[in-house]
Image: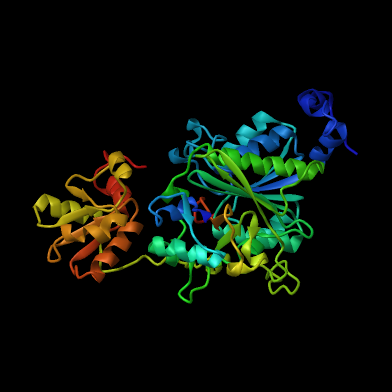
């Protein structure tokens, strides 16, 4: 059982939840459980080829999964997964 | 080595009596130069506090004009400044806060053509613009010129901050190699922002800038600070330099500045969409006055509907539209509108895909309605 923190911009696709508890032995399984529960999240997290999008980073606790075993990184009870997309609140042109 | 005048000693006394700053530190601040990009939400507190702290020279890049919607968060500007250039309004406040700081104006849009020329005269760069093209431009220019880049970004109730492009440290492209496609990440104009939030994040940027200059404490390098105002939580994630980063990696592929508007997928000349599916607000008003048989659908959120609405419109928020299609007659003439026209364009696409041929998008949304049809409808 892992906890996934949903960032503000993506909450609209996750029934406004900021935290979701999911089952999964790896990061990939936990994320699959997440998008199975909230299918609208899928296109925001994954490309059409099924790869995690380059402007969405996933952290297992405080570690970027790209520097551990990516989606194969093992998840144990009590772990926190954070989805951290790039944000930009300012005017489109500067 | 410059010295502090009697007036400056008095002004900076609360710095001078701390050993971590002291005379030596205050002189470091006085000898340093910082470039602020943007005098908006993040730029406002940054400019005010860095000026008060006694940075020797501060450059400001901005070409925007103060408007009423800025005042909820851009505290460097006041009500009397609406309509003035932000750079003039900001300098007026900064001169008042600390006349000992040398201010340099760069009244221009930062671009790949001028970034090196502007950046090269400063020790540190702080990006307060918070948009993707400028962020990648500032990042690449800082990496290529080896200037630390103090980063902050905000959205609604959440913020991020870190320091990029220090020697051996990560850069923004290590974190996010590519920007999201345009339209996927809403801006504050679309998504809103808690007015205090840029104050918190801007002051984290200001704190890190001063720490870098003084060379004290643990800088926010290799750590991404996340702030959640609603839950009042700070979290920290590890950031690493990516050896495969195209601009700071071991085999870099970017050696000069590129076209960042294009990189971020923003068309150079926003083509005036001459889509046949569009309708002017004035024409919608004429249709209403004539008593034409059509439905005006507002796809904004209920809280926006409370701020302002067009008489005769019905509210179906964009997110609810798929499951509320049955409320609309496929044979009816339908006009969709939102705040500025973006969401209603998506709504039109959705309706067309679902067999509604007679659907049109009201150009410019309710803001254009307020401008062209009925000025009593408030803008927001």
Could you tell me which residue is drawn at 67 percent across and 63 percent down? B140
Tell me residue B102's x, y (percent).
73, 39
Could you tell me which residue is drawn at 64 percent across and 60 percent down? A64
Colouring of the image: rainbow
Q: Is residue B359 above or below residue B226?
A: below
Q: Nearer the viewer, residue A89 or B318?
A: B318
Tell me residue B256's x, y (percent).
69, 69
Q: Nearer the viewer, residue B277 or A88?
A: A88
Query: Taking B32 as reference, is B379 left or right?
Result: left
Q: Quadrant of the C terminus of chain B?
A: top left
- Count all numbered tags in the image, as a single digit: 0
Q: Quadrant of the N terminus of chain B?
A: top right
Query: Taking B252 as reference, is B275 left or right?
Result: left
Q: Is residue B259 above or below residue A59?
A: below
Could you tell me which residue is drawn at 70 percent across and 32 percent down? B52
Q: Is residue A47 above or below residue B90?
A: below
Tell me residue B156's x, y (percent).
48, 45
Q: Quadrant of residue B136?
A: bottom right
For residue B302, say whether it is visible: yes
Could you tell me which residue is drawn at 19 percent across and 67 percent down? B356
Tell me residue B366's x, y (percent).
29, 49
Q: Quadrant of residue B283?
A: bottom left
């Amino acid at each position: 059982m892992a906890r996934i923190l949903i960032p503000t911009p993506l909450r609209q696709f996750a029934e406004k939840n900021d935290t979701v508890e999911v089952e999964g032995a790896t990061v990939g399984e936990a994320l699959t459980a997440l998008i199975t529960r909230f299918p609208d999240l899928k296109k925001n997290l994954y490309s059409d080829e099924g790869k995690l999008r380059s402007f969405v980073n996933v952290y297992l606790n405080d570690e970027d999964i790209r520097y551990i075993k990516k989606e194969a990184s093992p998840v144990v009870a009590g772990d926190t997964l954070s989805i951290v997309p790039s944000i930009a609140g300012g005017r489109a042109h500067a | 080595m410059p010295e502090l005048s009697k007036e400056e000693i008095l002004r900076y006394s609360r710095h001078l009596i701390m050993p971590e700053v002291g005379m030596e530190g205050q002189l470091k601040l006085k000898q340093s130069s910082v470039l602020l990009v943007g005098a908006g939400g993040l730029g406002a507190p940054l400019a005010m506090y860095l000026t008060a702290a006694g940075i020797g020279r501060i450059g400001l890049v901005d070409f925007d004009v103060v408007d009423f919607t800025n005042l909820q968060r851009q505290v460097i500007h006041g009500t009397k400044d609406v309509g003035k250039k932000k750079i003039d309004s900001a300098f007026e406040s900064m001169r008042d806060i600390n006349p000992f700081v040398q201010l340099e104006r760069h009244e221009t849009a930062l671009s790949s053509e001028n970034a090196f020329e502007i950046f090269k005269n400063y020790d540190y760069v702080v990006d307060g613009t918070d948009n993707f093209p400028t962020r990648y431009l500032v990042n690449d220019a800082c990496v290529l010129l080896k200037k630390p880049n103090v980063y902050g970004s905000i959205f609604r109730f959440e913020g991020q901050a870190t320091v990029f492009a220090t020697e051996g440290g990560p850069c923004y492209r290590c974190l996010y190699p590519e920007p999201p496609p345009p339209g996927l990440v809403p801006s504050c104009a679309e998504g809103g922002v808690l007015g205090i939030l840029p104050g918190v994040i801007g002051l984290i940027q200001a704190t890190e800038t001063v720490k870098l200059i003084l060379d004290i404490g643990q800088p926010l390098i290799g750590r991404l600070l996340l702030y959640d105002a609603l839950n009042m939580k700070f979290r920290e994630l590890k950031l690493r330099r990516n050896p495969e980063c195209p601009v700071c990696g071991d085999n870099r592929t970017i050696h000069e500045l590129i076209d960042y508007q294009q990189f971020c997928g923003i068309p150079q000349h926003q083509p005036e969409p001459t889509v046949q599916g569009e309708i002017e607000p004035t024409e919608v008003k004429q249709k209403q006055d004539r008593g034409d048989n059509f439905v005006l659908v507002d796809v904004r959120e209920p809280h926006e509907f409370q701020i302002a609405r067009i008489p005769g419109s019905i509210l179906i928020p964009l997110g609810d539209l798929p499951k509320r299609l049955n409320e609309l007659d496929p044979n009816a003439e339908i006009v969709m509108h939102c705040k500025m026209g973006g969401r209603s364009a998506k709504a039109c696409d959705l309706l067309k895909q679902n067999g509604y041929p007679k659907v049109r998008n009201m150009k410019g949304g309710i803001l254009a309605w307020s401008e062209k049809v009925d000025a009593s409808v408030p803008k927001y």
